[in-house]
Every structure is written in C-alpha cells, then in structure tokens.
Amino acid sequence: MRVFHITSNAIAESDSLPAQAPSSGFLWIACGRREFEIEQTQVQAALQAVGKVMLVDLHISDLLNNQLPSHFDYTSQYDILVFRRLTAGHSETDLEHPGQPLTQPLRRGGPPVLRHIDTNPVGFAVFDRVLLTVHPASCTVLEQYAARLRASDSTTARAAGVNLPSGPADLMLRIVNHMVDGFLELRRELTRQLDHWQTELLQPSTRFTNWGSLLDARKSLHQLDQICEDQRAAIQDWIEALAGWEVVEGKADHFGGAKGLELLKIRSRDVLEHIERVIHHVRRLEQNAETAVQMHFSAQSNRTNDIMRTLTALTAIFLPLNLIAGIFGMNFEFIPLLHLQTGFWWAMGTMLLIAVVLTGLFWRKRYLARTGR
C-alpha cells in the first residue's frame, strides 16, 4: 500500500495510513485489490479519520470485483469510477503466499498482439480530500504514474510548466488518461498485424491458412469494442455528474474553484475524446478485416471462374475431335476414307484444323486468356 500526500508544491510518500486529515493538499491512497480486501477495516478507519465518511458495502464489493466492467456511480459524499486497463494477464496474489497466482493466466490463441487485449479493472473512490485507488497486483499503471508524479515534483518539471494535480478528481482523470493512452498505443500493433493478414489474404499466389488467428483477431476486436463502449459510458456519466458540481464562493473546495472545475470538465472531455478515437479505430479495423475476407473469397471465386472457363474452352476444342474419332471408330465395313491410303492423314489434318480454328476463336474472345491482375 502506498500513500501520497500531494500539495500545490510538494509530494510526500509513505506506506502507512493517515490517522488524521492533512493540513493542506489531499491524499492518494493506492493499494492492491488483495490488500484492500484484507485491510479494508484499516482503510475505512483512515477514510473516517480524514474525511468523516466511509465506503458503503456495495461499493466495496465493486472495488473487489475483478470482473466488473467500466462504470460510474456516486453518492452525496463521494464518487466511484471503475475503469478497465490493459494488462498482460491475471496476476492477483495472496498476501500470505506472495508470488503464487490466485488465477491462472488465460490461454489465448493467435499472435502475441492479441494476448495484449486483456483487461483488469482499476477502482477509483473520489472524496473531497482523498483519492482511493484499488489496483490489480503488480499494476504497471500505478508504478508508471507514481514515477511520473514524482518526476513532476522536480524543479526542472516545474520550470517546464508541469503542474501537480489540483485535487483527487484531477488526479483520477490524469490516471485514467494514462490508461487510455495504453489503448491508443495498442492500435499500432493491431493495425500492423491486420495489414499483414490483408496482404496474405489478397495474395493470389499463396494459400491463406491462418483462419484461426484471424477469427481470434475478430473476437478480440469485438471484445475491445465492448470494453471501450463501457469506458465511454462511464466517462459520460462522470461528465454528467460533474456538470452538477457547484462552486461555493468564499469557501475552499476540493477541485480548485471555478477555474479548477472548468479544467476538470476540459480534461474529462479530452479523456472521452481519446476513448472515442480508440472506438473509431477498432471499428475501422473490424471493417477492414471483414472487407479483406470478402475480397479474399471474391478473388478465389474469380480464380475458380477462370479455371472453369479455361476447362470449358478446352472441352469445347476436343469435343469435335472426339466426335470424328468416334465416327471413324465405328465397326462399319463401308466408311468414307477408311480404305484410302491417305485417309488417316486427311482425318488428322481435319482434326488439327478444327482444333486450331477453335483455339484461335476462343483466344480472341479471351476464353483462354489469363485475367489481368
């Protein structure tokens, strides 16, 4: 468990829960899901000491549920946001047996890029002066953003215009935006993989056999679309709730006054726009994959039609030749040219002439010509 005390000009980190409210700034309490499950009594006591409010049982269940989709809920005293982030697999561990996974990683087929489309929920409880986050075990989002937060506290970062979060809601939106950036980076790998498959599908000289991976890709894209839809709905609910916040004149609040509230709305709309970009790109990839499959089968159908057309033309060329051969093969005693010394050459010449004429005719009509590609 990590506890950060964030003020307007400094950040202090500790590993113990606070016993009283800070004199200035706000607290960020970050803990793993198993830590929160085992030490929820101590966390509730710290929330009561800092903000005179505790989490309700239903919201505790939501924060502990590792299968919960992205969603938003609120009370008169705090807000709850559950947001799914990308993960390499399920790695929840028990504090009594560290390193032993509670659930085995999912065995997923297809190329490595598809195994990246796996998510775990991160829970946010936004109070007036406390942000409580519940992460999966070994959460890279927590480590990366904690490092970014410490880097922004440096003199160089301050000189570059990097500001610390103004409140719990601002910090939550920054972390969520960092999580959405992971989905944006995933687009490049998915695009590269699907472009490779499209090239194979539209290559006429190769036989595409990677149908299992392509089916896994379509399923993964559909799953990613559903995940992003849930994320968009959760952020939209958050924006609607944010519109109901009011600034009390002459009284300190937890979002930095009217200017801070406006910045929260701007940052929320920016997060929503990033999610919509991911949704748009995922749906375009789904459409491109479906189009490539249809074009593949259309090309195969055209190739089959070319083969059948060639075979039909060859059959038409040999049909009169077989007829002549059949006539001269009849067991009649009197057949013209049968007893002539040059009869064989007359028959062969006639058959060759018919074959040449039909071949030229079919070639001119492009029945034997190869379709241009």
Image (cartoon, grey):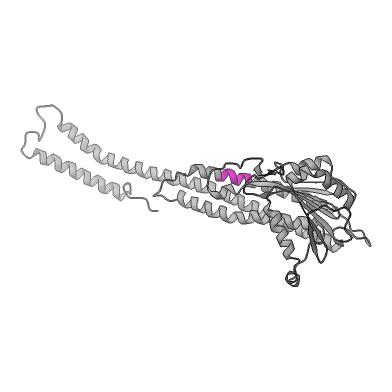
- Report the side of 16 relative to 220 (left or right): right
What residue sits 30% from the left and 50% below the top? 364
Whole-percent x, y for residue 357 in the image: 23, 46
Q: Toward which corner of the image does residue 350 lie, by quadrant?
A: top left
Whole-percent x, y for residue 119 in the image: 66, 47
In the picture as drawn, the residue positioned furthest to the front comes out as 96
Q: Toward which corner of the image does residue 64 lie, by quadrant?
A: top right
- Report the side of 95 relative to 108 (left or right): right
Q: Is residue 219 magenta?
A: yes
In front here: 263 or 342? 263
What residue sits 83% from the left and 59% below the top? 261
In front here: 10 or 164? 10
- Report the side of 127 relative to 134 (left or right): right
In front here: 239 or 26? 26
What residue sits 81% from the left and 44% below the top? 40
Does residue 177 lie above or below 218 as drawn?
Answer: below
Can the viewer see residue 77? no
Q: Main secondary structure of the magenta part?
A: helix
Does residue 132 lie above or below 314 as drawn?
Answer: below
What residue sits 55% from the left and 49% below the top? 112
In the picture as drawn, the residue positioned furthest to the left comes out as 341
Whole-percent x, y for residue 10 in the image: 80, 65
Whole-percent x, y for residue 98 in the image: 68, 45
Can the viewer see residue 354? yes
Q: Is residue 249 magenta?
A: no
In the picture as drawn, the residue positioned furthest to the right comes out as 250
Q: Toward which corner of the image does residue 169 lie, by quadrant?
A: bottom right
The magenta-colored residue range is 217-223
Q: How many marks?
A: 0
- Report the side of 135 relative to 128 (left or right): left
